Amino acid sequence: MVYLTRRWVSILMLVGLAVSQLLTAKAADPSSAGAAATVVVGNLTIDGAWARASMAGMKMGAGYLTVTNGGAADDELLAVTSPAADEVQIHRSQTQDGVMRMREVGATSVPAGQRIRFLPGGLHLMFMGLKAPWEVGQTVPVTLQFREAGEVTVSFEVRSGR
Ligand SMILES: [Cu+2]
């Protein structure tokens, strides 16, 4: 339909980046350029952070990420908060007797030298009481509190995917 020149595409990307940075202005980490950037805190590397677009009328949301512990000491994800939700819980989905259930697991260990993946159908962040619907393209600031590495705020990119 419309053929965008390379110049236009880069201008649009810059505008998009500026908007996403405005939306995540509360994010404490100025080094994270845009959504789903790799964030390093202490011995931990966090990447692939994304959240699912919320369904109409639903006040709950789910978020996913990968945490890699490159250090020699175990760490633990103690708590999660976000200005976009009343409460954030750490959940695990499990299929029991053919029914998918999820339960709150609380603090989650990130052992030395290991990678913990939060994925659909498994470990995930559950956002309760969304302040507003989450739409594809926006970003959600999420603060992760680790026992050893401390606190870090990561931008979760809202996607429609599964
Ligand atoms: Cu859940």
Image: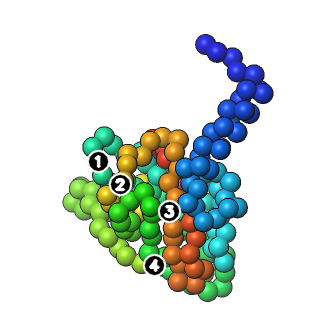
Can the viewer see residue 12 in this picture?
yes
Residue 154, image quadrant: bottom right
Q: What residue would you read off at disc 2?
A: 130
Residue 81, image quadrant: bottom left
Task: Answer whether labels 2 and 4 touch (C-beta < 8 Å).
Answer: no
Q: What residue would you read off at disc 1?
A: 58
Q: Looking at this view, name the residue that lies furthest to the top.
A: 1
Task: Answer whether labels 2 and 1 touch (C-beta < 8 Å).
Answer: yes
> Up-down: is 11 above or below 62?
above
Q: What residue would you read off at disc 3?
A: 142
Q: Residue at x 61, y 60 (%)?
A: 47
Q: What kind of element bears circle 4? A: strand
Q: What residue would you read off at disc 4?
A: 78
Tell me which amino acid carries mark 4.
Answer: Leu
> Up-down: is 16 above or below 63?
above
* Within-10-Å neighbours for mark 4: few <14, some 14–19, many 20+: some
